[in-house]
Amino acid sequence: MTVRIGVLALQGDVREHRQALAAVGAESAPVRTAADLARVDGIVLPGGESTTMSRLLGVFDLFEPLRDALAGGLPAYGSCAGMILLASRVLDTRSDARSLGTIDMTVRRNAFGRQVDSFETDLDVAGVPGGPMRAVFIRAPWVEEVAPEVDILARVRPQKVADGSTAGTIVAVRQGNAVATSFHPEVTGDLRMHDYFVRLVRDVAV
Ligand code: GLN
């Protein structure tokens, strides 16, 4: 079925997400107002700068409508700054920054630190077939803690922990219809994350 996927278009890499959505055969539309939001079957929250987006959500009277639509099950995919916006708790952000509380997790902003502000790696994402995907991290957040309802889809830098098992930093999660990644699939040409999200939106829209 034909679905229309909104891309929050207040700031950030809106064009890259719209191109990736078009490439997987989905119709997309920019979302700047509550009226725009009412016309979409799912929404992408792009990478960019989360505190700026938080402020602009207020300026455009979109914060409450978006928070409520997400709480009502509107499918969402947030990459990087978008992940920060979807979190219920954010560390190392501005005191006036707000987040939407869609995914019950604690996210640390700019978590990978100065030395590795930006890096790339290959990682497996649960539910995304076809082997590891190239993941680009740009001043990326990581996920420090998740509630039991949150599925962990990917981790980076696996290392042995005390009990002998192998853990790593959480960089992709899903709770219900909301998916978030610390990395930016919209800049690599690998369309599998967008394809995954479009399939999710189609399943919910039926
Ligand atoms: N560091 C940015 C923030 O805090 C996120 C970076 C990104 O989206 N590439 O919002």
Image (tube, rainbow, N blue to C red):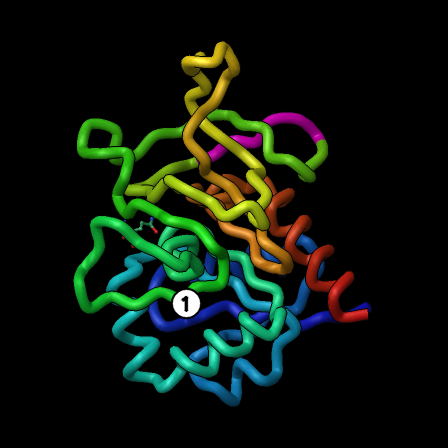
Give me the residue at 36% from left, 72% from top: 10
Q: Determine whether the beta carbon of the residue marked 1 sits less than 8 angstroms from the nearest atom of ligand 1.
A: no
Is residue 7 found left or right of 23 in the rendered image?
left
Image quarter where the C terminus lies is: bottom right
Residues rendered magenta in the picture: 130-135
In the image shown, does 168 or 149 lie closer to the viewer?
149
Task: Give the amino acid type for the residue marked by disc 1 in the picture.
Answer: Leu
Q: Position of residue 133 (x, y in %)?
A: 57, 31
Location of residue 94 (image quadrant)? bottom left
Q: Position of residue 164 (x, y in %)?
A: 49, 10
Q: In which quadrant of the rendered image does the N terminus lie?
A: bottom right
Q: Nearer the viewer, residue 27 or 38?
A: 38
Q: Residues within 10 Å of mark 1 (few under 14, many from 20)?
A: many
Q: Residue furthest bottom?
A: 35
Q: Foreground: 190 or 171?
A: 171
**Residue for point 47% across, 82% down:** 65
In the rendered view, tell whether residue 146 sits above or below residue 65: above
Identify which residue is drawn at 56% across, 53% down: 179
Q: In the image, what residue occupies the spot 60% across and 46% down? A: 193
Is residue 204 covered in magenta?
Answer: no
Q: Is residue 190 above or below residue 20?
A: above
Give the residue pinned by disc 1.
100
* Quarter of image, res 124: top right
Q: 149 left or right of 12?
A: right
- The location of residue 32, given as percent across then percent down, is 43, 80
Q: Position of residue 154 (x, y in %)?
A: 54, 34
Q: Is residue 2 left or right of residue 65?
A: right
Q: How many discs appear? A: 1
Secondary structure of the residue carrying numbered label 1: loop
